[in-house]
Image (cartoon, rainbow, N blue to C red):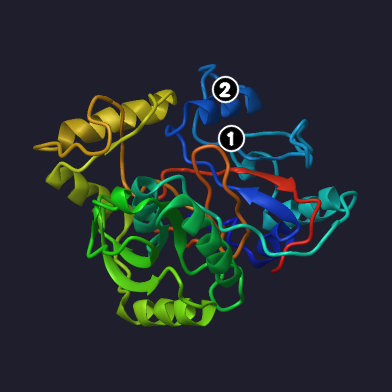
Amino acid sequence: MDRSFLSRPEVIAASRKFVCVRLISYEDAEEMKFLKGVVTTRSGEAENTVFTIFSPDGSKTLVRASRSMKQGFRDAADLAATMDRVAKPFEANGEGTPPLPLVADVRLGVNVAACDNQPLVVVFGEEKTRKALQDKVAALAWSKEWRGRFVYASAAAKDLSMIEGAEGKAGVLVIAPEKFGRKGKVLGQADADASAEAIAKAFAAAMKKWQPQEKTFANHVREGQRLGVFWETKTPVTDPQEARARERGKSKGDTVERHGFPSRASITKQPRTCGPSERRWVRIASSAQPASSRASASTARRSGCSRPSGRRRSS
């Protein structure tokens, strides 16, 4: 992950005044169309990555949009000072717990969790049941004890086929992602009618079983190429440099194990995305994720957008 800006304590502190959005490239056509309009690139297409700060209504940018924070700020202290200054005109208008920061679906949730080297929490069941559960889990997700410890997703029970050990009609699962983010295994579970205390106990028990993967970018990519593991994106990769890198990586594999959307030719290396520590993220477009996620060393050069929340969030 980016260790020069997003994981710095002063930036983390400043980010709590904002709604922070983490985008996942090449997974949602509307998201890619939006990003294309934020930054003008040499290719004229949406490219990894984008960083800017929007007004609360999203109508205008409050800092110059760029491909990275390094293009707009001297260092983390400069970014944090700018964020503090930009946030001042926007007063908080209420208290409350933010919504659960969800990745778009279980497929992406497992993949992002593998990248961030964190367990995945999935709230599953019928839509009405999930809504009540999400509110209950959100209170834990933003608590001091559990903030930044998990990636989150929500799904119907029928959408858990890639999760080994997933049982029942509704509840909360804590899942260990496979190294390459293709599947997961249940570490712990709480029933749909479980109290917040019972869910917290399930979290604690699962964390005792959780064993983070040891991996570096070079070794991870090399092993993935050796095994023929590639990630199929939902939309075409429009960043010319990344598209060429994908094709080079694909050609090095002896075999290709396709998964997700096999009709797509665009491939991306693993891990897929990354995010900084202890920050607040909300769902937007294809996905979003709590900024507290700790990415592995193999980032695929991801960043996102931030906007003043106009509302006080629990920190």
107, above or below 96, in the image: above
260 relative position to 276: left or right = left
Amino acid bearing label 1: Arg
Look at the image and tell me whether residue 297 can be seen. Answer: no
In which quarter of the view is residue 118 placed? bottom left
State the SS at label 1. Answer: loop
38, above or below 206, in the image: above
State the SS at label 2. Answer: loop
Instruction: Estimate the spatial distance between the alpha carbons at disc 1 and disc 2, rounded to whole Å.
Output: 9 Å
- Residue at the location (50% across, 54% down)? 128
In which quarter of the view is residue 56 placed? top right
Q: How many marks?
A: 2
The reply to whether the C-beta atoms of the residues labelled 1 and 2 are less than 8 Å apart is yes
- Residue at the location (44% across, 83% down)? 201
* Residue marked by disc 2: 41
* Residue marked by disc 1: 67
44, above or below 152, in the image: above
**The C terminus is located in which quarter?**
bottom right
